Amino acid sequence: MLSLMESATITGDIASVWETVSDPASWASWDPHVDVSRFEGDFVPGAEGWTKPRGAPGGPFKVVAVIPGKEYSTESPMPGGAMAITNTYEQIGAGQVRVTRRVQLTGWFTPVFKLFWAKGMARDMHHTFAALEQEAQRRAASV
C-alpha cells in the first residue's frame, strides 16, 4: 500500500469551496492537475465519472462517500488494485478553509505508480489547492 497526504489552508468560505469541488464536470476547467473530466448527474455515493490527470493515463472513478460541505471520497480501479482519495474541507476561521487530500493505493501496480507518478501527484496537490482557492473565490464573487 502507498499513502500520500497533503494539506493547506486556503482563503475562502466553505460554501464556495464545496460548490467548486462537488462539480466534477468542471474540474478540468480550473484544476491544473486535471486534463479532462467528465461527470453527469448528482454528486452522491454511487455516481461515476472519468478523469485524465496531467501526465498520466485517464480512467473511471466512483464517488463512494459524501458528507456535504465537509468531505468526499472517490475510488478508481488500478491494475490489480485501486486508488482511494478522500478530500476534507474545514472552515477554520473567517475566510480560511483547511483542505486535506489523502490518497491510498493498493495492489500490485502500487510500486509502478510510486516510481512514475507519486512524487508528481504529491507536488501537484498544492497547485490544485491554490487553483481551488482562486476558483472558489471567483464563484463567490459571481453570486
Image (spheres, rainbow, N blue to C red):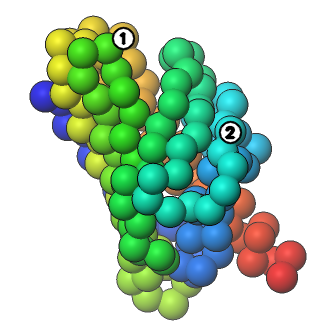
Percent across and percent down for residue 107 are 18, 20
Q: Amino acid at mark 1?
A: Phe
Q: Which mark is residue 36?
A: none
Against 30, residue 12 (above or below) is below
Residue 95 position, x and y percent, is 55, 83
Q: Which residue is mark 2?
A: 38
Please, is residue 115 above or below residue 133 in the view?
above
Q: Position of residue 61 (x, y in %)?
A: 47, 37
Q: Secondary structure at mark 1?
A: helix
- Residue placed most toward the observer, 53 or 98: 53
Q: Quadrant of the C terminus?
A: bottom right
Q: Label 2 sits on what residue type? A: Arg
Decide if residue 133 is in sight here. no
Give the residue at x 63% y 50%: 24
Instruction: Work out how far the residue at label 1 is from the one at label 2, CA to CA, in angstroms.
Output: 24 Å
76 versus 48 height, above or below: above
- Residue 116: give its label: 1
First in sequence: mark 1 vs mark 2: 2
Q: Quadrant of residue 22?
A: bottom right
Visible residue check, residue 81: yes
Q: At x 64% / y 70%, what residue is drawn? A: 19
Give above or below for 127 relative to 89.
Answer: above
Q: Is residue 81 left or right of residue 45?
A: left
Dot 1, how many residues are within 10 Å of its Cα: few (below 14), some (14-19), or many (20+)? few
